[in-house]
Amino acid sequence: MMICDPADYSDTVDADVERFRLLTARNVINSDMLRTAGIAASVRSVNIEIILRHELNIPRRKLLEALADHYQCRWVEYDERTAVPPDLLTGLDINLLCGALWFPVIRDGDTVIIATSDPADPFVMEQVRRMVHAETLEFRVALVEDIQSFIQDFLNGPPAHIIGNERTGLAFWRNIMSRWRTRLACYRTDFAIARTHFSSLRWGLGLITTGRVMLQLERGGQLWTMFCWTMVVVGVLLLLLGFSSYFRIKRSIVRPPAPHTLIEVSSATLHFLENYQFAEKERPEEAPPRGTMLARLMDLLPNSCVFIENSTDNKVRSYLAHERTALAAQRTVLACYRTIYARARTGLSFIRTGSSFVGIGTGLIEYFKFSIMTMVDVIIILTGLLMIADGIMWYWPVRKEQREAPKMS
């Protein structure tokens, strides 16, 4: 039986230990374990990063920080959404890249950023200068598996067809739109709760009015008086419940989700249209441009399309990913419309409740004439007028959106 002598791998192990010396300085791993990992990597003929990353479960960022400290440079991490310019991919030899482990990832003005596993390797520098045409080159250290992922994603087809891992980018935007639609659904739920409590407020006012009228009938009897006062007390409790909800929604919702804010945020979630090769079709001449931003956003989606050439990296599912994202964008715009209409319905509920207060207060004064209770009736009328004014403030900004709401064709 042949036993491996760790001394046979001394030079390689020492080099690996030196590259990740920061891990021991920060007590992420002790020096004996780091050297053992280096020996194991040499025996298995694998990179030490694989053992540190997947067997010792050291976080990716800590490995990158250790490498950056050793080479005295910045680090770069693999991201499926990285938009590598196609001109950087022209003329690259995939065999050389796999052997030397480097890849051009970013163009920043006249500077091209190169991800490499060894920024100090002179052969890597010579290859990069020969194959990448740029005024300035910046070398950043990266993990070997990250560089391999870049190569697999961007060099699996002709450079003219490479668009990166586009489906991941589209899924990222669908998640953004989903989070915003969830937020809009929360707003609509709050509006619905407020409208429900306004119904309680109107019921309370009705019970108070009914109880007061029945007391004036003077039918006599203690049981009759207790019944009437019970109605008044229940009505007061319902009024307090309704008003507490009214003031709570005034404090928490009336300011943040103004219609203009809702539309602006919805528009921001559709920013992907500018980045994923959407081409806007011309509108028919007989259709004039819409007046509101939300209506124009709604028109933009069905009048946009994307041209994806058939290649090895663009399968049918890439086109379907575009279609799913466009449909998600339509749902986002419609969710914004529903939220705005929920706000309008809440404003109309304010107006209905205020009108009930004004009508009942006026009727009580007319029926019972002036008395000590007239002051209460006047307060009811003033409260109703304030609620009507508040409801108009909620409803009025939505009127222009109603005129250009999407219609089923």
Image (cartoon, grey):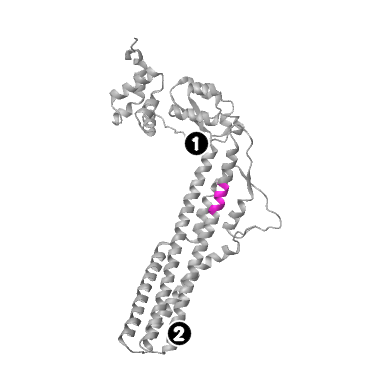
Numbered disc in front, either 2 or 1 = 2
Quadrant of the frame with the C terminus: bottom right
Find residue 281 and name its label: none
Q: What's the distance in space between the residues labelled 2 and 1, CA to CA?
A: 69 Å
Q: Main secondary structure of the magenta part?
A: helix
Identify the amino acid type marked 1.
Answer: Glu
Q: Give the residue type that dot 2 points to.
A: Gly
Spot the residue most to the right. Answer: 285
**Can residue 144 be seen at all in this image of the molecule?**
yes
Pick whichever of labels 2 and 1 is earlier in the sequence. 1
176 or 356: which is nearer to us?
356
Q: Nearer the viewer, residue 390 or 68?
A: 390
Res 369 → quadrant: bottom left
Residue under numbered circle 2: 363
Does the magenta portion include 145? Answer: no
Range covered by the magenta-colored residues: 325-332
Image x and y of residue 144, in percent: 44, 26
